[in-house]
Amino acid sequence: MVAKLQVNDVFKIFGNDPKEALRRLREGEDKQTIFEATGQTVGVQNASFEVGEGQIFVVMGLSGSGKSTLVRMLNGLIRPTGGEILIDGEDVASCSEATLRRIRREKIAMVFQHFALFPHRTIAENAAYGLKIKGIGAAERRQRAVATLDQVGLGAWADSLPSELSGGMQQRVGLARALATDPQILLMDEPFGALDPLIRKEMQEELLVLQRRLKKTIIFITHDLNEALMLGDRIAIMKDGRFVQVGTAQEIVSNPADDYVSAFVADIDRGRVFTAAHVSDDPAHVELGTDNAEDAIRVMEDLNRNALYVLDGNEIAGVVTYQQLVTADRDSGSAGTPLAELLITEYPTTDLDTQLADLYGPASAGLPIAVTDADNRLVGVVEPESVFAQLSTENGADKNENSDDRPLSATQAAQ
Amino acid sequence: MSPSDLLIIPFDDWINLLVRDWLVPNFRPLFRAMQVPITFVLNVLDDFFALVPMLVMTAAFALLAFRYAGRGTALFTLLGFIFIDMIGLWPETMTTLSMILTSVFFCTVIGIPVGILAARSNVLWKITRPTLDIMQTIPSFVYLVPIVMLFGVGMAPGIIATIIFALPPIIRLTNLGIRNVRGDLIEAAEAFGSTSWQMLIEVQFPLALRTIMAGLNQTLMLALSMVVIAALIGAGGLGLVVNTGLGRLDVGGATAGGVGIVILAIVLDRITQGLGEQQGVPTVSLRQALVSLFRLRPQAAAETGKAG
């Protein structure tokens, strides 16, 4: 992974004597104490992270956590008090105004919370703003702006005014304006925060679709953890100007760094954070041609499973359950019933990227879910129990603990 | 016992010293030179208004009023101007009009840049604001004397007095308009790499235009109210008619001049207000505004229809 954007040890202190505050900060005093002693407000302290090319890095925090200050330092709207911000190796924190302007024109664009569209310009003119600033001629500007508007589905509105558009549409224009200059880095400051929940969801999905094609490096600011988990390749949780935790959605949900993060994570729909990949077991199976019921029963007993997939070469032939095999063996009086007679050919399948929330239905059938790859090969098996086990907050992270519980409760039930 | 028993400050003598013995002998040529552009613009306008026949001028104003202020004002303009002509004050009205327009022209040329600069620098605004307060509160008679001493008497000094009096609103409102442009729009413009000139031309000025137009309207009204006072130091036009009436206790003459001023004031006020309202439509750039000024109404309407 190449780091497109690297932030090292960045501080921002608001006030007339940042040096003093910085000194106290390095001595370990906290934000509140420094404010009381010196009147200096610590905006961001000691922020370090890097974002790889094509990644979405989400900074999540409540208001006043310094997330907006942080994102504004990345394009120099706010100059940091200390530290360095490297974009392709160039330091935005210390460069000249002219260099900063060049970087803003060429490399980095921004989308704003309240859209910040120019009310006196048409949609196309708004989308073309960055191009105009770069000095691109009117005809090319218009053509590129309209092409970008088409990408966000607003090509037909090119000659309307922003006031004629709904909030969601306005933010699409904001996105188009940022994309029109073809920047490598996109800063998004709570872009969907001012939208209705339904529109917000739609925009989030659309952003992901766009991102799949455009592969921009995105720094996304939000106060909504669900949004962060949905969009972020990596997520930083901010509090009082500091990063409390940085990690992937799964790391943060399954392993909160402290009580602050736990409190956030508590309300999270875990079914939307984890995917089949997180609960998938090894794809143990039996062969249709060579194995018989007895072999299958032995494998199941070894693995402590209730059902097993049967493969015919590379193809999935079907699934057999323990119950069925035992019954069949008893009925026929022999242990070698061919599997073909007992095969259940209606079985649930999924792929590794499917969210757990979408597995509730298939899991409720009671059969293990076959996890297949693009070529329809069996790459894993998801036991129905593990889908629901992962959803329970306390032990969800540790699957084995749950599987240990199972025989115990079975014994208790038997007594 | 009062402080004056202890010390008398010869404030008036100081001012006399400053103006009469230092400014006048040393800087008179400079002040004289300052009149040149004013006289030039005034003469151009004066010649133009003298040249254009009364009916054509009336029609033009009625048309402007119709476009920007509606049918009622257009009718009022028509009747008002005809009335002025019938009471025999048309040439004086045109003189006053060219004076006013000259003053407003210079107020704009000075005021908008100063307002913009003041909006961009808090230090400059801290200096500008009390200066404007003084300009607005000091009775205009006070500066008539030094103006006469420095510039002499006549039209140009009258216009200079008018400019001093009428300048503050346009500076204030330009400053206000620029400062009131939404912060996130400034941020957006900056985030895309605008230079400060691009920011001004592309974002700040167009968005402040409506407020600036309100300032222009105020400046125009103040300039009109200075007409009579400027006539005291030799400016002609309707102010002179009023002053002459005053001097001769000729109530009829003075009233006639007054009525002329009022009619002119109403017409100019309505037209510039209408112009300002139209700027409020957020599409209009400065260039478009100037173009649309010379275009007839139906075409403009057609264009709006097309855009929408």
Image (cartoon, coloured by chain):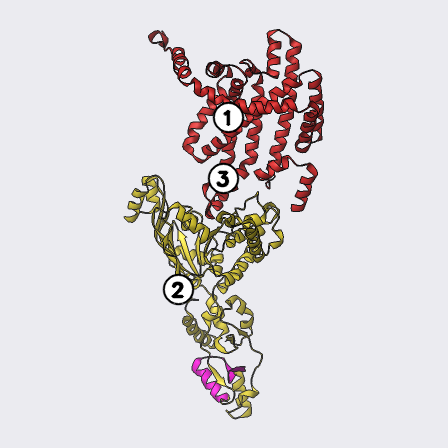
- A291 or A6, nearer to the observer: A6
Question: Residue at coordinates 61% horizontally, 10% vertically from top-left?
Answer: B244
- B300 or A400, nearer to the observer: B300
Residue B183 to residue A131: above or below: above
What's the CA distance linking mark 2 and mark 1?
A: 60 Å
Asked if both marks, 2 and 1, belong to the same chain, the answer given is no
The x, y position of residue A219, in whole percent, is 44, 55
- Write down the region rendered in magenta: A293-321
The x, y position of residue B73, in whole percent, is 69, 28
The residue that mark 3 highlights is B200
The x, y position of residue A86, in whole percent, is 37, 54
Rendered shade, chain A: yellow
| Residue at the farthest bottom position | A334
Question: Residue at coordinates 46% horizontally, 80% vertically from top-left?
Answer: A284
Q: Nearer the viewer, mark 2 or mark 1?
A: 1
Which element type, helix, strand or loop, lies under badge 2? loop
Q: Chain of mark 2?
A: A
Around disc 1, counting alpha carbons within 10 Å, would you say few (fewer than 14), some (14 to 19), or many (20 or more)?
Answer: many
| Residue contact between numbered discs 2 and 3, judged by CB atoms under 8 Å | no
Which element type, helix, strand or loop, lies under badge 3? helix
Magenta stretch: residue A313 in it?
Answer: yes
The residue that mark 1 highlights is B168
Asked which quadrant contains residue B124, the reply is top left
Q: Chain of mark 3?
A: B
Which element type, helix, strand or loop, lies under badge 1? helix
